[in-house]
């Protein structure tokens, strides 16, 4: 069983930055591929970015959706069992509840479908004002 706890959400003005954290439990946390998703009011949950399972200090390769490519980055701190979503140059369209998720799928791929993830955090609200 893996428990995920997100933090770092809040209210920010357009053009600002936020860093979300996803703290995971378990000694094997670093072996899971991780993903970030978001759900805006009235919309379906959508893939934001993901990081592959990793054993290096940097924790794997990353993939992002087109809407956040170049503005968001993901990193993993193996010692802290934490994955971060750094969000820069935010705009009102980024307003949503953000979720982190852990995948049990084997290998070193980055998974973009929410069906590929087994464990989910409770979500954290990000609101970007214009």
Image: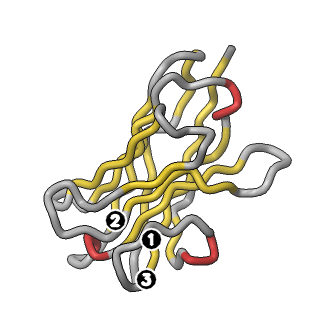
SS category of the residue bearing label 2: strand
Residue ID for mark 2 = 24
Q: Are marks 1 and 3 in contact (CB under 8 Å)?
A: yes
Res 61 → quadrant: bottom left
- Closer to the chain start, of discs 3 and 2, is 2
Residue at image mark 3: 104
As drawn, 92 above or below 114: above
Q: Residue at x 46, y 76 (%)?
A: 103
Mark-to-mark CA distance, 3 and 2: 14 Å
Q: Position of residue 70 (x, y in %)?
A: 47, 34
Q: What colouring method underlies this structural image?
A: secondary structure
Q: Percent x, y for residue 21?
A: 38, 47
Residue 35 lies left or right of residue 114; in this view the side is: left
Tell me if 37 is positioned left or right of 74 in this view: right
Residue 59: x %, y % from top left: 24, 60
Residue 95, position in %: x, y? 66, 34
For label 1, the residue is: 102
The C terminus lies in quadrant: top right
């Amino acid at each position: 069983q893996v428990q995920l706890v997100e933090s770092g959400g809040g209210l920010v003005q357009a053009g600002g930055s936020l860093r979300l954290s996803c703290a995971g439990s378990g000694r094997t946390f670093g072996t899971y591929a991780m993903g970030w998703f978001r759900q805006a009011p009235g919309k379906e949950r959508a893939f934001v970015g993901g990081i592959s399972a990793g054993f290096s200090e940097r924790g794997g390769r990353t993939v992002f959706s087109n809407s956040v490519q170049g503005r968001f980055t993901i990193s993993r701190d193996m010692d802290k069992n934490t994955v971060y979503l750094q969000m820069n140059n935010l705009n009102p369209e980024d307003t949503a509840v953000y979720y982190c998720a852990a995948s049990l799928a084997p290998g070193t791929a980055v998974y973009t479908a929410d069906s590929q993830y087994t464990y989910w955090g409770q979500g954290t609200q990000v609101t970007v004002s214009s």
